[in-house]
Image: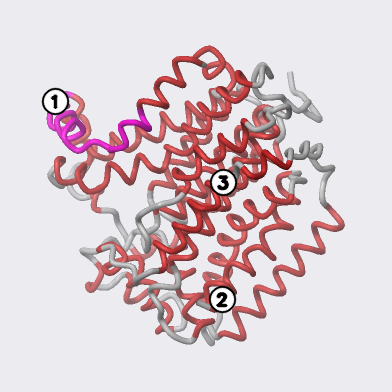
Amino acid sequence: MSGTLVLIALALAIGAPLARLATRESNGGALLGFGLLFGSGAIGVLMFALSLIPGGWSRTAIVTAALVLAALAWAAAIRLAPAPLPPLPPLPPHARLLLAPALLILAGHALYATVAPAIEVDFLENWGLKGRIFWSHGAIDWEWLAGEAMWQNHPDYPILLPLLFAFVATVEGSWEDRAIGLLYTAWAAGVLLVAAAELRRSAPRSGVVVPVAVVSLASLAVTPWIGIADGLFLALAGGAALLLRRGTANLDAREIAAGSALLGLAAWTKNEGMTLVVAGAIAVIATAGWRPRLLAGLLPGIVLAGAWGVPRALLGLESDLAAGDPLGRVLEGIRSPGPLLAALGTWTTGRPLLWGGLLLGALVGARELLRRERLLLVLCGTQLAFYLLAYLATPHEIDWQVRWSWERLVSHVRFPLAFAVVVVLTAILVRGGGPEREPAPERES
């Protein structure tokens, strides 16, 4: 467990000052949340860089490098941090008590995530296997990754999560499946802290409404799939979506760049992150228009995604979706969508009360939702469209593919979709007229 706690502590030490630099965030809870997301990504990228240096990883080397990075980040934040966002109004004491159920959800998830070693098949055959091989090798084992041993087992999957697993094992000095489960609770808490701050900023006269809204989002932030990449991806996608939302509302290129960086880290986490980078760009353009300064803020995500795409291309780590003629399969699937529709009808995402509640809330706040939360709607809708196209492109049997992946894929966008509905309903309940907008420091014609 010590390796996991060290990773969380170092992620906060590195990520909190990076978040202060990148987001103008002033709320302590949100800084902790963003810190966990940025810091986890930074540690993964640091492990990648150290693996390219002769000598490989060691406990001393990786912890020292992380501490140096944290010191540099704090020095930069002290000297270069921009003017912070206005402070959030304090919550009344009785409202804070209403956050207890959210804390119980996170505590229960921590127990669930650490009660036993991870048993997901994809953990045993991919994410965990890669992490253990990298740890045993003392660096990324590119030869093994591109070799015959992995050619049928998704060697193309991004490696941020295995690198974090390898960090924990290197610090711990041994491989412990069970302890890494706590990372998933930390990432869920991180994105929930960010959402809580955004809800309070959107409805400053909320009183007890925002704590109730936070509790309603808590169960969507946690993941049941311990050991695979969807939990980290969900948190990165949620944090990125909320930053892009704020950046387009304020016409703030800095916040868009920060959100784009989280999109790029998502591309280092799952292949779906590549399409998420594109979906984020489409959402920004659809919301803020064609503004070159804001669009330049999308470059960090593109650069990070490309940084993983280069070794993947050089080693020929191809996705199974690329086998044969994927474009031909997509065109055929568009002409004959019956098998896909039948599979989606058979293997639903579950949680009918949740989806019914979101639909009802969307209908109640439809006007405000379409007017004020366009970015979240476009981003999530575009990403879901990419998922459906991927199903049409698959060389595998569509029913099988949908059965074993659809619920996990929908979980990627469920949190930002629910946030969009909840924030609009919160604004209506407190008669705030919807989310408040910060004036942009510079507006373009």
Nearest to the observer: residue 282 or residue 41: 41
Give the residue at mark 3: 192
Nearest to the observer: residue 402 or residue 397: 402
SS at badge 1: loop
Residue 313 image label: none
Q: Are marks 3 and 1 in contact (CB under 8 Å)?
A: no
Judge whether residue 26 is colored magenta: no
Quick check: 353 above or below 136?
above
Quadrant hosting residue 135: bottom left
Q: Does label 3 or label 1 sit earlier along the sequence?
A: 3
At x 82% / y 45%, what residue is drawn?
82
Give the residue at mark 2: 50
Task: Give amino acid for label 1.
Answer: Ser
Quadrant hosting residue 210: top right
Quadrant hosting residue 275: top left
At x 78% / y 63%, what residue is drawn?
74
Q: What percent of the width, then of the height, locates residue 274?
A: 43, 46
Quick check: 16 above or below 44?
above
Q: What percent of the width, then of the height, locates residue 35?
A: 65, 56
Q: Residues within 10 Å of mark 1 (few under 14, many from 20)?
A: few
Task: Give amino acid for label 2.
Answer: Leu
Mark in the foreground, 3 or 1? 3
Q: What percent of the width, then of the height, locates residue 148?
A: 22, 72
User: Which segment is the magenta one?
Assistant: 335-355
Nearest to the observer: residue 133 or residue 230: 230
Q: Are marks 2 and 3 in contact (CB under 8 Å)?
A: no
Q: CA distance from mark 2 to mark 3?
A: 31 Å
